[in-house]
Each structure stands twice: as C-alpha cells, then as structure tokens.
Amino acid sequence: MIEEARQYIENSTDVRPVIGVVLGSGLGAFAAELTERVDLPYSELPGWPGSTAVGHAGRLILGKVGDMDVAVMAGRVHLYEGYSPAQVTFGVRVLGTLGVRSMVFTNAAGGINQSLTRGGLVLISDHINLQCSNPLAGPNDDALGPRFPDMSEAYSAEYRAIAKAVAAELSIPLAEGVYAAVLGPSYETPAEIRYLRAIGADLVGMSTAPEVIVANHMGMKVLGISCVTNMAAGILAQKISHDEVLETGAMVRDTLVRFLRALLPRLEPGPPRARS
C-alpha cells in the first residue's frame, strides 16, 4: 500500500517535498502556513490509517515554506489507538518513498525534569523506547533500509545546533532533553515518573519513537521538538487531563509556528535515498 499511497499523492500535486513535518496533539496550526497547498484527508489516501485522537486533524498537507517543498502530517496515529507499529509509521514510510529526506517530529509531552515549564519547547536529544514494540521487527525490506540501522544519533546533532541558533535569534527559550516513549493511553503514575527520571528521561509521551526509528531506517535526518503541555504525575499537586494538553498546545501555537517557519528553510535535507 505504500506505493499506492505514493502514486496517489504524486497524482494529486506537483509539490515534491524534501522535508516532512509531523504535528502532534494541539499543534496543528503550522499547516496553515504552507502556500500553494493541497490538503489530502488521510481517509482518501490508500492504506493510510485515520487519526482518532482528539487534537489530530488527520490530513496530509503539501505545499511550500518559502521556496522549500514541504509535507505536513497534521495529526498522527498511535499504538494506543489499536494500530500496529507498521500502521503508526506508514506515513513516514510513504513520505520517504516520495523523496522526503528529513523529518521534523513535534509532540505534546509531560515534563519530568523539574527545570522544564508548561508551554516550553524542548529539543529531543535522544529517546528511550518503552512501548514494548519496534516497527522494524519482522522481515526486513532491504529496499527501505538495513536490517540493523544505527541509532547512535537518532536526532541529528547538526539539526539541533541549527534549531538552537534559530531559537536564539527569535528569543524563544529552547531546552533540550531525553524523551521517554510509553504506550498509553493512561497517563503515568507518580511511581512510573520517578522511575523514568531515574533512567534519564526529561520528558514523557506516547508517540514519536516508532516514527523516528523508521525515519532513521530509511536514512532520513531527524529533528524532534516536544511541547511541554503538562508537568508529569506527582510533580504538581494536580491531576492530568487531555484538555490541559490541548489548552497548552493552543497557548504555544504562535511560538511554534514562528519557530518552524524560520527553522525549516535553514535545514539542509539529507542526501537522496538510494533506490534499489
């Protein structure tokens, strides 16, 4: 179905994206920034799973940021929705076959490191995959990537340096930290948060890691950006709700849009992927 989706997209637009952006819970406003845009609902794309989570629009938008052709996934699907790892990463696979050579993943995350603040943006320096699955398990398609891809720089150091420079120019505070990916959909217990802190996590969320694994498998360069939409369980004397996540996403919307608009043209896409 990857090839069918690629052909459908290529027949729907002349845009040939070199960078892809995935927008997480409540963070979909950036899609409106694209010019010469074509909106394709996931329901129209062959094999593309539909978003069921609140705050995920469920559309692929292709267009331009400046002179750069960009593909934006406004919403993603998650393992907790009942989708398989292959379905969760289907969009990244399709974008890779379209010619996308770099991916920017955004997500809503809970803050574990107490130096982080609600509404802050955090560069992901690395992740800890605690979702008990890997999208590369099973037979490997050598046309897509190697059997054992290296993950020692899953999040490009070059891209992180560029992101820090852009944030400084725009006077946007930008922290950096390790993202722990858990299955969900229940939020973590205070004991689980203490465990995650002990193993080195600064943030926790329910997405991103599978997509980043697949992007690296396909040879793409990756940048990850978390929005701290709430402080994790046990840090503040209050309960956690998805309404808070969406509310914070709306609060940080303009900052994230301004940041991505300035950042994307500065990211040099990775080398073209060799086709077998």
Image (cartoon, rainbow, N blue to C red):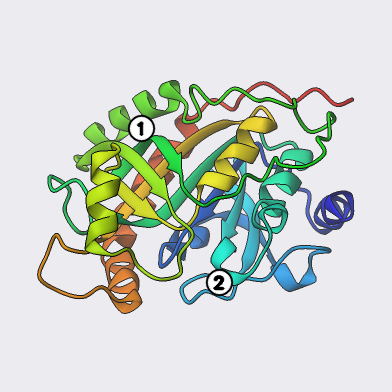
9 lies left or right of 245: right
Q: Nearer the viewer, residue 171 or 89?
A: 89
142 lies left or right of 231: right
Answer with the quarter of the image where residue 176 lies: top left
- Helix, strand or loop status at disc 1: helix
Q: Nearer the viewer, residue 274 or 264?
A: 274
Eyeballing the image, is 131 above or below 276?
A: below
Give the image location of residue 258, x and y in percent.
34, 50
Give the image location of residue 88, x and y in percent.
64, 57
Q: Please report the residue visible at 61 percent of the width from the left and 31 percent of the height from the top.
A: 216
Q: Which mark is residue 57?
A: 2
113 lies left or right of 41: left
User: Is there any visible trace of residue 15 in the rendered image?
Assistant: no
Query: Is the residue marked by circle 1 packed among few (<14), some (14-19), or many (20+) residues within 10 Å?
Result: many
Q: Please report the residue visible at 50 percent of the width from the left and 62 percent of the height from the top.
A: 32
Give the image location of residue 71, x and y in percent.
63, 49
Q: Please report the residue visible at 55 percent of the width from the left and 55 percent of the height from the top.
A: 34
Answer with the quarter of the image where residue 189 lies: bottom left
Query: Which residue is labeled 1 in the image?
Result: 163
Q: Which mark is residue 189?
A: none
